[in-house]
Image (cartoon, rainbow, N blue to C red):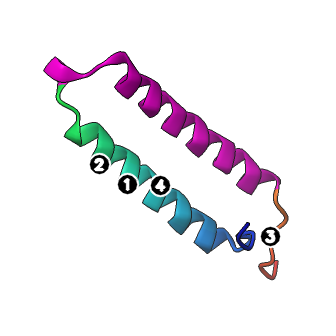
Amino acid sequence: MGKSITDKEQQVTYMKQRLSMFLDVLDAIEPESTELEDIDRLIAMVDDLDNKMQQFKNRPSTENE
């Protein structure tokens, strides 16, 4: 596994990148041809984002306070 991100700025940047990827996928979906698997994948992406956010919230920061 990779190194944990403990810097709050890096965490925000990571979440912005992941959210941007999600929005790109959402924009690419054609409503007329969307299948249940596509919706399931979108839900999984949202769940992944939520899980990562929870990890970041519970992770101690290395920033000087």
Residue 31 location, x and y as percent? 19, 22
Q: Amino acid at mark 1?
A: Ser
- State how far apart marks 3 and 2 are (Cα): 30 Å
Q: Residues within 10 Å of mark 2 (few under 14, many from 20)?
A: few
Q: Describe residue 36's horizontal placement relative to residue 57 as left or right.
A: left
User: SS at mark 4?
Assistant: helix
Q: Residue at x 46, y 59 (%)?
A: 16
Indicate which disc residue 8 carries. none
Give the mark, 1 or 3, whose residue is nearer the N terminus: 1
Q: Nearer the viewer, mark 1 or mark 3?
A: 1
Residue of label 4: 18
- State how far apart marks 4 and 3 are (Cα): 20 Å
Label pair 1/4, CB-CB below 8 angstroms: yes
Q: Using the image, determine if residue 52 lies above or below residue 65.
A: above
Label pair 1/2, CB-CB below 8 angstroms: yes
Residue of label 2: 24
Residue 64 location, x and y as percent? 81, 82
Q: Give the magenta part as a residue range.
A: 31-58
Indicate which disc residue 61 carries. 3
